[in-house]
Structure formats: C-alpha cells, structure tokens
Amino acid sequence: MSTTTAPPKRFLGDAVIAWLATPVHSARIEIVRIAAPLAILGFLSSRIAHADEWLGDAGFRVPDLGRADYRQPLHLPTLPNGAAWALVVVLVASGLAVSAGLRARRAALVFAATTALVALADRLAAFSVSKLAPVVAIALATSACGARWSVDAWLARRASAKSEEAHEEKTASGAVRFFQVLLPVIYCASGIAKAKGDWLKHSHVLWTHLHDSYQTAVTVFLANLMPAFAWTVMQAITLAFEAFALLWFGWAKTRGAAVLWAVSMHAMIGLMFGPVRWFAMLMATLVVAAFLSDERLDHLDRWVAKLAAKVSGRASRPSKKRSRNRARRRSDRPSS
C-alpha cells in the first residue's frame, strides 16, 4: 500500500519572503521613474520660482522653537539667496535626470536628498507630495530603474549595437513591492481619518468640498450637472474604497476594479481641485505602476517599441530635400 507524504507546511513568513523574491515586470519601476519626478517638480514649481523667499533670507521663515516638537523635527537655518538658487538648480536637474534616465539611480539619490532638505527647510510649504518625494526617490535609487526607456539604455544600445527589444522583461521586486504596500496603507489611513471625521456623520461632505477655493471650471460644470445625492453616493464609495483598500488591492478578483476606481478618482481630483493636480498625478502614477496587470504592461511595451521604431526610422531616413541636394551635388561634380 503506497503512502503519500503531506506537503510541508508553509508559514506566513515563507509566503512573504517568496512574494518579495518574485521578479516583477520591469516596466513598473520605469513608469514611476519617468512620471513621479515630473509630478513632484510640478508641485514644487511654484516654490522653485521664488527660491530666495522659499529657502533664502528674502522671505519669512518659522523661527527655531528651541525645543523638540513634532511640528519641527529639525530646524534648518536660512540659506543665502545664491545658495538657495543653487539648491533648486540641483533639485530640478536631478529630478529631470531621473525622469530621463540619465544616471538614474545616482540622480535619484541626489533628488532624494534635495527634496528632503527643502521639505524640512520650510515646513509651512511641505504637503503630501513634499513628504512622499524623498520616499519615492529613495525607492528608485535602490531599484534597477533606468534599465529601459531611458537615456542610459539608449546610449548602451548604441554602444553595443543591440536592438530595441534587448532588455530584461523582469526585474527585482523590492521597490515595486514597497509601493504595493505603501499605497493601500495610505488609502486605508485616509479612510479611517475620514470615518473618524465627518464622512459618516454628514452625507454632504464631498458636496461641500466642491464649493471650496480649489474649484475649477470642471468643478462648477459638474456641480451644476449632477444632483446633490450623486455626490453622496460617490462619498460613500470613496470611503469604502479607501477604508478597505488592503482588501481591494490584495484580492486578485477586485484588483482591476480597484485600479480603475483609483485612477478615475485621482483624475477627478486633479480636474476638479486645481492645486491638488500634482498629488493626483503622483498617486495615479504609483497606482498604475504598482497594480496594473502584466497584460496591460505588455501592451504598453509593444506600443513604446512601435513608437521608438517609428521615431528612430524617421531620424535615420534622410529628408527628400536633403536627398535632392546630395543628388544635385553629385551631378555637378566634373567627370574624370
């Protein structure tokens, strides 16, 4: 009589380690690398334009409280105006280098340091994007970002004469797993804060938000188009989505709907609440990169490959005018 041995028990820690060790689609980290720094720089652009008042000694700064306080974890003295402008130049240059994929990992370290510095230097101007920026940059610096869709990848292909398709389809998952945990935690914390606030007590909280100073032309249009109860329904769906985000993103059967709702929600936030558009862009970028299905990413891969082939074909194909000029020069040469 044959006996079968039971499979070894798999503990939760083993499953987590296997999940962390499983490679992920390499496009995920590249999406964050390209779009996240642009969203961060877009948010900081209004401050960068006035660097002398933001970081220098030309504007108001909160004085040193002289004691340990969570509202001022580190007091940084004002910079000379020239140093303030030099700092924002490094900030912008490193952010653009990350997005372009030019020495992406090293640039991400510089971007992390400069964004952390400016967030601590002026606590009154530090909001969600300011605080997320160093975290996102550190995650990029510890990843394999820049291996594709980047200036470095283009230079490497030119040097080794490799084709456009020569890239690794899978990459280490550490940074992507970090984003996959970070996003549901942020949503869940936001949902709990809303539930402890007024979102369960009053049915028109979202409706009142439409009448704030952040409103845009889209806000006015939709507020006049949709009945008030529709905003109550959206308020309830948003609260349920955020409070139970760990479930929606963690369960494969609901993950696609969660991605669709999250991207739609942030698109509406960006369109309807103007100053928050950069936060909406950053969050939507992280959602797409972290949770979009591999099949969709494969479609994006093929589209990028076709676009790159078309652009490179146009670059290498001589124009008709240039061809005619070359032919004319050859015909004008005296025959030997």
Image (cartoon, helix red, strand yellow):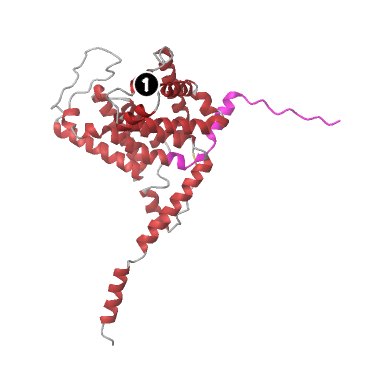
Vertical placement of residue 327 versus 81, above or below: below
The stretch of residues the image draws in magenta is 1-29
The quarter of the picture where the N terminus appears is: top right
Image coords of residue 270 (percent x, y): 35, 32
Q: Nearer the viewer, residue 47 or 1?
A: 47
Q: Is residue 82 above or below residue 161?
A: above
Residue 144 seen anywhere in this rendered image of the structure? no
- Image-quadrant location for residue 56: top left
The kind of residue on which mark 1 rests is Trp
| Whole-percent x, y for residue 297 in the image | 49, 43
Q: Quadrant of residue 104?
A: top left
Question: Of all residues shown, which one is farthest toward the left?
Answer: 58
Question: What element does badge 1 sit on?
Answer: helix
Name the one closer to the observer, 283 or 26.
283
Q: Residues within 10 Å of mark 1 (few under 14, many from 20)?
A: some
The number of numbered discs placed on residues in the rendered structure image is: 1
Residue 217 visible: yes
Residue depicted at x 37% and y 21%? 207
Q: Which residue is mark 1?
A: 207
Q: Residue furthest bottom?
A: 336
Locate residue 78, reporting x and y percent: 17, 25
Q: Residue at x 53, y 34 (%)?
A: 21
Q: Quadrant of the C terminus?
A: bottom left
- Place of residue 36 in the rendered image (x, y in percent of width and height, measured from the top left): 36, 36
Residue 6 lies in the magenta-colored region: yes
Q: Is residue 52 shown in magenta?
A: no
